[in-house]
Amino acid sequence: MTTKSTTKTRNLCVILGDQLSENISSFEGFDKKKDSILMMEVLDEIEYVNHHKKKLVLIFSAMRHFAEDLRKKGFNVIYVEFDDSKSSFTKELERQCGIHKPEKIVVTHPGEYRVLVEIKKWNDFLKIPTLILEDTRFFCQISEFNEWAEGRKELRMETFYQMMRKKYKILLDEKGGPIGGKWNYDVKNRKRLPKDIGVIPEPLAHKPDKITQSIIEKLKEKFSNHFGEIEPFWFAVTRDEAQKSLDDFLENRLDLFGPYEDAMAQNEKFLFHSVLSMYLNIGLLNPRDVIQKILEKKSIPIESIEGFVRQILGWREYVRGVYWHYMPKYNESNFFEAKKKLPDFYWTGETEMNCVKTCIEQTIQESYAHHIQRLMVTGNFALIAGLNPKEVCDWYLSVYADAFEWVELPNTHGMILYADGGILGSKPYAASGNYINKMSDYCKGCKYDVKKKDGKDACPFNYLYWDFFLKNQKKLEKNPRLWTVFSTIKKMSKEKKEQIASDSAEFLKKI
Ligand code: FAD
Ligand code: DLZ
Ligand code: SF4
């Protein structure tokens, strides 16, 4: 596909790599006779973090398929591939404006603050009026979240989620209360995977077609330095394929999604998770359609239905709201003043901590890890080892196919690192090896002993956990949710504290 030379266009509608939906707001009022679409693959976006190769294939293949689909429907699409493009959105757009002389540029609000800043300069730089429209794929608009957030002493997902359930009348009874009497079935969603669970159906794998194959070959040639394994590539790259992946999840995994949402297992990468986040985030699936389809599954237990709805209508919308409410300051904070460099094993998986190794190796292969692996293994380690927030955030933004800053940053900077000092969540999610052992079978295959609290063989999560609270006692001891932690610390002997500090220092020195 190369740049299509056309005559003068009226509106130039810019579609970004995560806006691949025909109902995107920038298409409103689009006139096939007068307007054109511009899609650009540009080096700056490829290189601003070390994106996983599978993520790059997903984005470019989905972009090219979307463009082809639009062309078939009679849209005039100007598509610039990375081999032919200028280095940035702005530079390529400038060139295209020189050719097509648009009267106006129309674009849907991007998913990253960095890109918004760039877009806001187009008006003056190109001397062409630029219209930025709301991203209506979300249930909650940015202004609506800001209104909800302003004046509140603290923001909490649960309050926001209940507000959204009421507004959209989702899972409500006749009196407007929650179906089943409870807003939240979280306590039923914490089961460990039983041994006799049987075969868990894997997510649907899609065969790469010619377009995908040619991108894989090109990326191998040009971007072999990027993180992760490019093949086997099995992601959906079209709307049809993503729909099939959704149907497959509804049919084969949704029923047990709720109970095993927090479980982890050595040989199960996906368990009962949907593996739909990347399709939702780039626009191949629409969250409204997904929720609609989930609600039609009347025979599925409420803990699975509510659990899933909470992720999409609650967490997904809430983190986006927090991101736009607090940017650009949000990523500047470092509540614990954590400074340690990200260890190399985050890129290689070469560590003797079996839980961390398993989650990272899976990430290298699939560009995917489920929520509890991200939160309680790699994330928990980053928190209690005191890793630098900026480096941790860049890692999460690079390695996952679903990573775009609006969703990655609040989850990383806020949820796992508590670097925002408690804006997103009410306490740090620190945990010792006991939690990982309770929710997985990772410890069985580990060189370290999860039952040991100190010494060379002890599980590093055990002493790092206490070391973290001891080092940050002043900042956290007034938090009522951490009362038990600090009452244990109060009873701890001086020798014990010294042992924790020396085991931790020795371990951290090695990494
Ligand atoms: P499921 O477990 O099947 O959940 C269903 C859907 O709910 C997901 O597809 C997703 O759209 C939504 N969802 C669930 N949890 C969250 C959450 N905390 N925030 C936002 N949406 C949520 N999610 C991303 O989409 N992009 C990211 O870059 C990202 N980075 C994360 C970083 C960290 C440190 C953590 C702890 C979580 C992150 N998440 C991110 C949230 C979550 O881990 C992923 O959405 C989920 O693992 C995707 O897999 P799935 O589709 O199988 O999800
Ligand atoms: C992540 C990404 C990559 C790797 N490449 C492109 C690209 O070449 N063109 C594009 O339009 N978008 C790309 N993206 C997504 C953007 O970096 C960015 O996350 C979104 O534009 C924010 O809405
Ligand atoms: Fe992870 Fe500790 Fe268990 Fe090893 S013993 S797998 S390091 S929790």
Image (tube, rainbow, N blue to C red):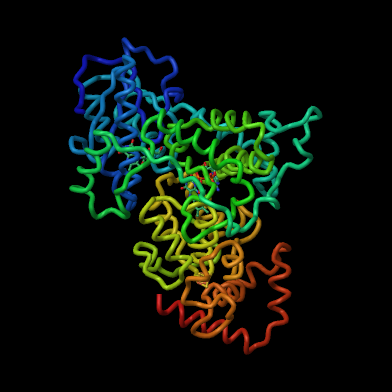
What is the total number of numbered labels drawn onto the structure image?
0
Q: Residue at x 55, y 82 (%)?
A: 501
Residue 176 left/right relative to 75: right
Quadrant where the image shows the N terminus: top left
**In the rendered image, the vertical position of residue 165 relative to residue 355, given as above or below:** above
Query: Residue 436: image x %, image y %?
Result: 57, 65
Along the viewing direction, whichever of 479 and 402 lies nearer the viewer:
402
Q: Quadrant of residue 441?
A: bottom right
Q: Quadrant of residue 471?
A: bottom right
Along the viewing direction, whichever of 367 and 98 lies nearer the viewer:
367
Query: Residue 210: image x %, image y %?
Result: 24, 33
Query: Residue 16: image x %, image y %?
Result: 36, 33
Q: Which residue is outermost to the top?
A: 33
Query: Residue 293: image x %, image y %?
Result: 57, 29
Residue 437 left/right relative to 478: left
Does residue 419 appear in this view?
A: no
Q: Which residue is outermost to the right?
A: 175
Q: Residue at x 29, y 18 (%)?
A: 76
Along the viewing direction, whichever of 217 and 482 lies nearer the viewer:
217
Does residue 498 appear in this view?
A: yes
**In the rendered image, the vertical position of residue 453 relative to residue 120, given as above or below:** below
Q: Residue at x 34, y 38 (%)?
A: 59
Q: Quadrant of residue 469?
A: bottom right
Q: Residue at x 69, y 66 (%)?
A: 482
Along the viewing direction, whichever of 413 and 235 lies nearer the viewer:
235
Quadrant where the image shows the C terminus: bottom left
